[in-house]
Every structure is written in C-alpha cells, then in structure tokens.
Image (cartoon, coloured by chain):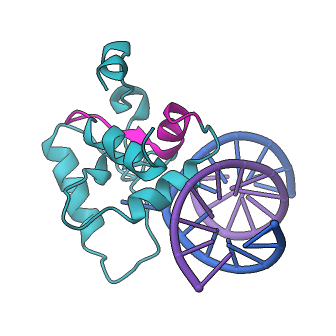
Chain colours: A cyan, B blue, C purple
DNA sequence: CTACTGACTGATC
DNA sequence: TGATCAGCCAGTA
C-alpha cells in the first residue's frame, strides 16, 4: 500500500495517450469516491523531476483545471495542444468528449500493478 | 488533535 | 449556461 499521492501518480502515468480521466474517476479507483479534491491536491504536488501527464487528468466538466492562475499560465494551453496531438478532440468550448475519451483501467491493468 | 487549504463534485438557484 | 454552497479527503501548520 503506497501513499495516496503515489497511487495517484501511478494511475495517471498509466493513462494511455489519447485518453483522459477525471479526478473523481481516479478517486473512485483509489477507493475514495469523494476524494477528488485530494487527488487534485496530489497532482498539484507532482514532483518536478518526474514527468506526470497530469494534462490527461481533467475535471468532471471535461476541461483542464484552471489551477488558480499561478505563476504558470501558459501551461494549460500547451497541455491542450499536447492532448490534441494525442488525438483528443476539443470542442468550441475547449471541452473534451468524456464519453469518447474517458479511459478506465481494465482488470488486467489493475492485476498487473 | 483541531483548523485551514486545495488543479473537485454534485446539487441548487 | 454560469455562479454559489456544502460535503468530501489528504496534507500541512
């Protein structure tokens, strides 16, 4: 049993390109359906030395989390471009079609880890 | 242990 | 559709 954060990281890292997950989805997979906030906080603390595709983690609205306009404001746009490169389609509202791109690990993936 | 915060979510207005 | 409120969990002071 790893720390909650590490579980989040491992889960995010195994998200295949062209697919996305919501904070709530991750929280459920970790056994805490209402720990979406904690998940967001975990991603907020993503180690700078480790590349975490957190851009593949979005909120229930299907959009990139604004993260409160910190010192970094160009990242969100860049992440959106990266997702588009992976094949994720954004609509005119900058939203993602969750029903089409939302990914959930299969039984084998869970068994493997 | 209590209080506060946060990249969330669902319900309500 | 957009803004607001309360509940939720983990981490930090």
Look at the image and give the residue range highlighted in magenta: A15-31
Res. A28 image quadrant = top right
Question: Would residue A22 be counted in the magenta stretch?
Answer: yes
Q: Please tell me whether residue B4 is drawn above or below residue A40 in the rendered image.
A: below
| Residue B6 horizontal/vertical position (percent) | 53, 70
Q: Please tell me whether residue A10 is drawn above or below residue A67 in the rendered image.
A: above
| Residue B9 horizontal/vertical position (percent) | 61, 44
Toward the viewer: A24 or A49?
Answer: A49
Res. A18 image quadrant = top left
Residue at the image position 25 percent from the left and 55 percent from the top: A80
Q: Quadrant of the C terminus of chain A?
A: top left
Q: Please tell me whether residue B11 is drawn above or below residue A65 in the rendered image.
A: above
Left or right, A32 with reference to A15: right
Residue at the image position 40 percent from the left and 43 percent from the top: A7
Question: Would residue A94 be counted in the magenta stretch?
Answer: no
Left or right, A61 with reference to A14: right
Residue at the image position 35 percent from the left and 50 percent from the top: A92
Q: Please tell me whether residue C6 is drawn above or below residue A71 in the rendered image.
A: above
Toward the viewer: A112 or A79?
Answer: A112
Toward the viewer: A96 or C7?
Answer: C7
Residue at the image position 50 percent from the left and 36 percent from the top: A25
Q: How many marks?
A: 0
Q: Quadrant of the N terminus of chain A?
A: top left
Left or right, C11 with reference to A94: right
Residue most extreme to the left: A85
| Residue A24 horizontal/vertical position (percent) | 54, 41
Toward the viewer: A113 or A71?
Answer: A113
């Amino acid at each position: 049993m790893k720390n909650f954060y590490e579980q989040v990281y491992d889960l995010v890292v195994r998200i295949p390109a062209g697919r996305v997950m919501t904070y709530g989805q991750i929280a459920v997979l970790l056994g805490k359906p209402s720990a979406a906030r904690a998940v967001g906080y975990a991603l907020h603390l993503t180690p700078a030395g480790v590349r975490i595709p957190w851009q593949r983690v979005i909120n229930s609205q299907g959009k990139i989390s604004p993260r409160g306009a910190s010192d970094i404001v160009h990242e969100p746009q860049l992440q959106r471009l990266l997702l588009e490169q992976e094949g994720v389609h954004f609509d005119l509202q900058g939203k993602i079609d969750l029903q089409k791109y939302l990914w959930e690990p299969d039984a084998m993936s869970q068994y493997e880890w």
